[in-house]
Amino acid sequence: MTINEIQDEIIDEFEGITDWMDRYAYIIELGESLPEFPDSEKTPANLIEGCQSRVWITAETDAEGNVIYHADSDALIVKGIVALLLRTLSGHKPDEILGADLYFIDRIGLKDHLSPTRSNGLVAMVKQMRNYALAFKALGR
């Protein structure tokens, strides 16, 4: 699936959940589905600056040159937000990630329902994920 197809799928899922308490519960559930993130990767180098809670993101490329992200957070809602970002961007080429307009964030109302510090953290997470894509592109991966 393309990044936009994944975003459209996420938007469709959230349209079926009208109450924001239920949306938060769903976001938390998504975070719980993230694969285990090794403690050895919870280092200052992988910590996202600008987040109120602690968020770690790492990335690698697969044999086809797709960027594969791994992440974790110590906050339930943030972990769910990270899961949404990973679902959207992981498994795509660096150019696709760098060119992506992450419109699902606004369309599901996430940006309007986050505190200013959480919104800043979301921006910092997206920036770091794009930085990884840029680095892999520069390396020709």
Image: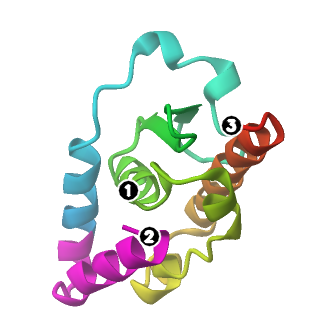
Q: Main secondary structure of the magenta part?
A: helix
Please state which amino acid type lies under the numbered disc 1.
Arg
Look at the picture and state if 138 lies above or below 113.
above
Residue flagged by tag 2: what amino acid is it? Answer: Thr
Q: Kindly report the distance in space between the C-alpha atoms of the residues bearing marks 1 and 2.
A: 11 Å
For residue 140, which quarter of the picture? top right
State the image coordinates of residue 92 (x, y, percent, origin top left): 51, 54
Q: Earlier in the sequence, mark 3 or mark 2?
A: 2
The quarter of the rendered structure image containing the C terminus is top right
Of labels 3 and 1, earlier in sequence is 1
Note whether residue 12 is visible: yes
Name which residue lies at 69% across and 53% down.
130
How crowded pointer 1 is (Cα within 10 Å; few <14, some 14-19, many 20+) is rated as some
Please report the bounds of the magenta region as a residue range. Answer: 1-23
For this view, does 92 lie left or right of residue 95?
A: left
Indicate yes or no whether the magenta region holds residue 18: yes
Instruction: Give coordinates of residue 2: x percent, y percent.
Output: 44, 70
The residue identified by callout 3 is: 141
Q: Which residue is mark 2?
A: 2
Spatial CA span between label 3 and label 1: 20 Å
Q: Nearer the viewer, residue 86 or 26?
A: 86
Compared to residue 45, the image places residue 63 above or below, namely below
Q: Nearer the viewer, mark 3 or mark 1?
A: 3
Q: Residue at x 37, y 25 (%)?
A: 37
Indicate the amino acid at tag 3: Arg
Q: Which residue is mark 1?
A: 87
